[in-house]
Amino acid sequence: MYRICTFDEIAERGIAAFSPEKFDVAENLERPHAILLRSHNLTIEELDTDIVAIARAGAGVNNIPVDACTERGIVVFNTPGANANSVKEIVLAALLLSARDIVGGMRFVRTLQDARSEIDVQAKVESEKKRFKGRELTGRTLGIVGLGSVGSMVAKAALDLGMDVIGYDPALSIDAAWRLPSQVIRMESISDLLSRSELVSLHVPANSETVSMINAETLRSFQPGTALLNFAREEIVDVPAVVEALDSGVLSYYFTDFPNSILSGHERAHAMPHLGASTTEAEENCALMAANQLDSFLRFGNIENSVNFPTITLEPSEGHRIGISNKNVAGSLGGLLSVLADRQINVIDLINKSRGEIAYNLIDIAEPPSEQVLSDLLAIETVMGVRAIESEIR
């Protein structure tokens, strides 16, 4: 039976996806084979020697020591796209709020509680409502930086609202390109996008290329009065530079899902308490996707949506399966097969995939692997991990 240790509150739909006959899923399990978490900041010290996989019910993996996991041959999964609709909806709310000063209008109405009569309330409303006049979104240009799962959904919704949509994503995948509506105009550079946009929405991960991508320099490319939305990652925006742009009028509003002390006092900076994926549906979708990925990996060795290992799937055969991770160097696969050939072990089927410096192999053999065979495979210099997959793969 596989042991899965959970952190945080995982949606019941995800927990229920594990067969109780094959999985023991609970908090504080000793010597777990896998970890399922959401926002818990996992430390290297919590990586027990039996752990072979970690799944995060969410897209980002900043709370997981991925490099340390890779060195130990631990596969790290995330759930891209599972919460995309939830994030898309909150971005749409921010777009509407940025076009019309709805927040300011509601704040004004709260000040009317001390009015002497209903007539006074209505008189003040009629005299002051022009302060909160806005513009329609129809016909305005939305620039989207990052055209993945969320960005493409935001693009489609914006087009449905009658907006003109332009996008920039130098790392656009083939799958994402297929999802992208044809009406979205691709920009060749981020400066081109920023200079043509009236509203800008950010949908990129935080990495060495995107940290502080919105800064004092890139803000010079913005049209005066642009609204900026960041529901992706806090680190991609230089917050002091954004506050300065709000004060100077370069930005009309800044809506974000990442509050901090610098933004809290600014009347045109509206921060939400990380609500992008905080819907029942998003939490269930993420938990279910993460559970299914762990199930497939632990029982069959298959990998999908890993952030550090290649995608790989091998259909069940009549054999006994071994999963092997190794450094992606020439001759590694030959070394693995030599160990099996020297012991006259027949290979029924195999698949080998690589991702950067990491390779992963699924090998089906005609007989159950002995402890000596597993030990000999692990002794190969380039091998990082070996696992006999104890599943009924036949």
Image (spheres, rainbow, N blue to C red):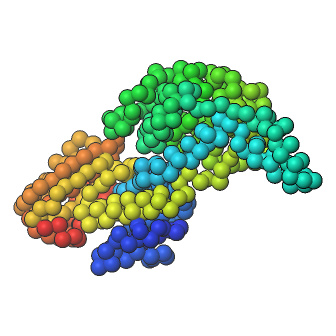
* Residue at figure coordinates x 65%, y 54% from the top left: 273
Q: Residue at point 53% right, 54% down?
A: 277
Q: Between residue 320 and residue 265, name the one nearer to us.
A: 265
What is the quadrant of residue 230 in the picture?
top right
Which quadrant of the figure contains the C terminus? bottom left
Q: Is 22 situated left or right of 257 in this image?
A: left
- Image location of residue 344, percent across then percent down: 6, 61
Q: Nearer the viewer, residue 112 or 75?
A: 112
How many numbered dots are placed on residues in this image?
0
Where is residue 175 drawn, in percent x and y?
A: 33, 39
376 or 251: nearer the viewer: 251
Tell me where residue 292 appears, x and y as whole percent: 33, 62
Q: Residue furthest front?
A: 119
Q: Is residue 376 visible from the viewing direction of this image? A: no
Quarter assignment of residue 24? bottom left
In the rendered image, the vertical position of residue 204 relative to residue 318, given as above or below: above
Position of 89 with respect to 105 (left or right) is left
Q: Quadrant of the N terminus?
A: bottom left
- Judging depth in this view, the residue of 60 and 230 nearest the camera is 230
Q: Position of residue 32 (x, y in %)?
A: 40, 72
- Compared to 320, does 261 lie above or below? above
Residue 15 visible, this orientation:
yes
- Which residue reaches farthest bottom? 21
Q: Which residue is at a point 41% across and 27% down the rendered structure image? A: 183
- Residue drawn 48% across the image and 39% down it: 157
Q: Relative to residue 200, is residue 329 depicted above or below?
A: below
